[in-house]
Image (cartoon, coloured by chain):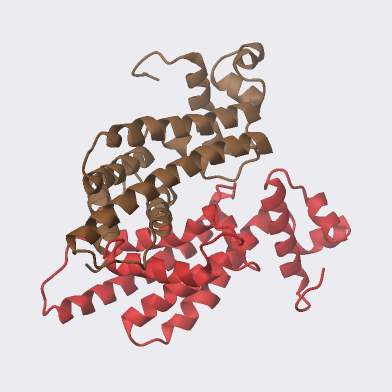
Chain colours: A red, B brown
Amino acid sequence: MARESVLDPRQEILRTAARLFQQQGYDGTSMNDVAAALKLSKGGLYHHFQSKDEILFNLMNHAMDITEEQVIAPVKSIANPEDRLRALIRRHIGVVLSERDREITVMLHENHPLTPALRKRINARKKDYVHFVENLIAEVQSNAQDARRGSPKKTVTPRAAAFALLGMINWIYQWYRPEGSLQEESLVQQYTEIFFQGAFG
Amino acid sequence: MARESVLDPRQEILRTAARLFQQQGYDGTSMNDVAAALKLSKGGLYHHFQSKDEILFNLMNHAMDITEEQVIAPVKSIANPEDRLRALIRRHIGVVLSERDREITVMLHENHPLTPALRKRINARKKDYVHFVENLIAEVQSNAQDARRGSPKKTVTPRAAAFALLGMINWIYQWYRPEGSLQEESLVQQYTEIFFQGAFG
């Protein structure tokens, strides 16, 4: 298979493992399967990762790196909060639909076994992202309130709105088909409109 | 443990299996584990279910039964489409948060192995529910359009709106904690408002 660039070996192992986990399940995939798919000796694989758990943790961690690099970092420089939120929606949908990253980011959402210590580290990163979205929504709400000259909108909290938005977007992997009729640009526009104005605006 | 009523044995097996799958993973749970947790002989368990796959399929099927009984059937008699949609949101959130049903309905969303034939049957039922929501949203949109004297709102399609709504609601299991500050009634009101008016209404 042609690759766009030479990957570092750890990244290549993670991508291959992610693909196998998707195809045959996490528990249905052994370290031997991963080594065989990479044409690596078992020793070669263990040189990089001691266990399947370690691969799973690094996969989830890498998925959070992708979110930070592709979503959080690029939007941080956008001064206007509403523009920043619109860019976040677009970029987060982009990551979910990315053919390259899909098999990795989906690992964040499945209930696979991690040791409590590693689970805690992943959950802390997930929570940081929720808080980033929550704070951004609070900023946009506060601007919208100023524009209405202070008439407060108290019914929707930034926290519930953040969970609603992340649910809409992260759920896409459950139904999206690359060959389907609902494609990225249309999805970005419609989801943005639903979140800002509702489905019946 | 006290039970509210005597369950039929198949239902009791499914509930126990669902709990074990949540606690120790689908692949980490054997038919022996299920039998032991129920104080059943292995033969007693196999009398009801031939394999773990069969349990998984029946669990998912039962989760769809719950959705039909708790969400679809009760809202069908509501004449006004907007009221019907509001009731659907409330009831679907109720099912997701239900302590009794949570471990069963969550099985619908995890990527566990089913044979293609069984997978197809579950997917067909999931699709029926998506279409029910989609048609209901189309009805509400069409009423909203009549109220605006025909100025059409073409940007949000019923299909994208249905996926957005189901994503918001089904995602709740990823972050909801019974002891958390965001509780059912508040969640129903906020999610309904976001879906109808947006997060900044």
- Classify residue B46 as left or right of residue B87: right
- Camera sees residue B172: no
Relative side of B173 to A18, left or right: left
The image quarter containing residue B38 is top right
Q: For the point 48% across and 21% down, which residue is it?
A: B11
Q: Residue at x 89, y 58 (%)?
A: A41
Q: Where does the image place residue A159, in percent across and percent down from the top left? A: 31, 62
The N terminus of chain B lies in quadrant:
top left
Number of numbered discs visible in the structure rendering: 0
Q: Nearer the viewer, residue A189 or A63?
A: A189
Query: At which x and y percent is residue A181?
Result: 54, 61
Q: Nearer the viewer, residue A52 or A175?
A: A175
Residue A90 visible somewhere in the drawing? yes
Give the left or right position of residue A90, taking residue B25 as reference. left
Taking the spot 39% from the left edge, 13% from the top edge, the residue there is: B6
- Using the rendered view, name the quadrant where residue A101 is placed: bottom right
In the picture, the quarter occupied by the C terminus of chain B is bottom left
Q: Quadrant of residue B21?
A: top right
Q: Is residue B139 above or below residue A105?
A: above
